[in-house]
């Protein structure tokens, strides 16, 4: 009797482990899902740190990624760092490169940006995504840049990062 209960418990545990593993392999993080941890790490690094850009070089079709990189700038220290979020892990590395100094502010999440980009012709098999400031003066704005890939015919889409409103698209020649 005890052996039978143990077998059922072992079988149930195995099913839960396998289902959990499949779920983890099937998707990743949205850009905003790790934001609380990432911002806390940035503020711990430098109290005045502001998020100035974010990106992932390999994004799933649903707008999630296994890894996101978040760039921070400290105006007081005039320093920069990149925080990498991978699952529940965050890793900070101080860097010397970077140009953005403005806080990104609010932005729609990557899954919403991906859906909107698909409506506006996103095409390609190697999607990557980033949120950055573009332009200068009155035309300056924060954009989601959803790149479909680098092959001829692939299409990249630019969206207003705050609203998700379509801005433009570019076809690779």
Image (spheres, rainbow, N blue to C red):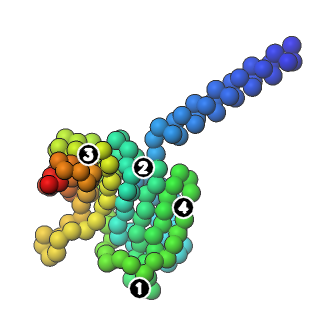
Q: Is residue 130 above or below residue 15?
A: below
Q: Residues under labels 3 and 1: Cα distance?
A: 38 Å
Q: Residues under labels 3 and 4: Cα distance?
A: 29 Å
The reply to whether dot 3 and dot 1 touch (C-beta < 8 Å) is no
> Which residue lies at the image location 46% right of the left edge and 45% below the top edge?
28
Task: For marks 2 and 3, give the one nearer the viewer.
Answer: 3
Residue 1, horizontal then vertical, whole percent: 86, 13
In the image, is 100 to the left or to the right of 94?
left
The reply to whether dot 2 and dot 4 touch (C-beta < 8 Å) is no
Q: Which residue is mark 4?
A: 90
- Label 3, secondary structure: give it: loop
Q: Residues under labels 2 and 1: Cα distance?
A: 30 Å
Q: Earlier in the sequence, mark 1 or mark 4?
A: 1
On residue 124, the disc is 3
Q: Earlier in the sequence, mark 3 or mark 1?
A: 1
Q: Which residue is mark 2?
A: 65
Task: For marks 3 and 1, give the one nearer the viewer.
Answer: 3
Residue 21, horizontal then vertical, whole percent: 58, 36
- Label 4, secondary structure: give it: strand
* On-image quarter of the C terminus: bottom left
In the image, is 152 to the left or to the right of 104?
left
Residue 79, horizontal then vertical, whole percent: 43, 82
Q: Residues under labels 2 and 3: Cα distance?
A: 16 Å
- Label 1, secondary structure: give it: loop
Q: Residues under labels 2 and 4: Cα distance?
A: 14 Å
Q: Is residue 56 visible?
A: yes
Question: Which is nearer the eye, 91 or 49?
Answer: 91
- Crowding at mark 2 (Cα within 10 Å: few <14, some 14-19, many 20+): many
Q: Residues under labels 1 and 4: Cα distance?
A: 22 Å
Task: For marks 2 and 4, give the one nearer the viewer.
Answer: 2
On residue 78, the disc is 1
In the image, is 145 to the left or to the right of 58?
left
């Amino acid at each position: 009797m005890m052996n039978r209960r143990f077998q059922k418990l072992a079988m149930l545990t195995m099913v839960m482990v396998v289902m959990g593993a499949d779920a983890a392999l099937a998707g990743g993080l949205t850009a905003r899902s790790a934001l609380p941890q990432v911002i806390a790490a940035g503020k711990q690094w430098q109290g005045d740190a502001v998020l100035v850009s974010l990106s992932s070089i390999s994004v799933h079709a649903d707008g999630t990624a296994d890894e996101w990189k978040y760039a921070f700038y400290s105006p007081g220290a005039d320093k920069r760092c990149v925080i990498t979020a991978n699952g529940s892990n965050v890793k900070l590395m101080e860097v010397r490169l970077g140009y953005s100094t403005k806080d990104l502010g609010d932005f729609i999440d990557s899954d919403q940006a991906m859906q909107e980009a698909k409506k506006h012709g996103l095409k390609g098999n190697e999607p990557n995504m980033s949120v950055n400031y573009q332009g200068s003066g009155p035309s300056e704005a924060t954009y989601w840049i959803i790149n479909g890939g680098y092959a001829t015919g692939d299409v990249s889409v630019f969206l207003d990062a705050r609203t998700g409103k379509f801005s433009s698209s570019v076809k690779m020649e």
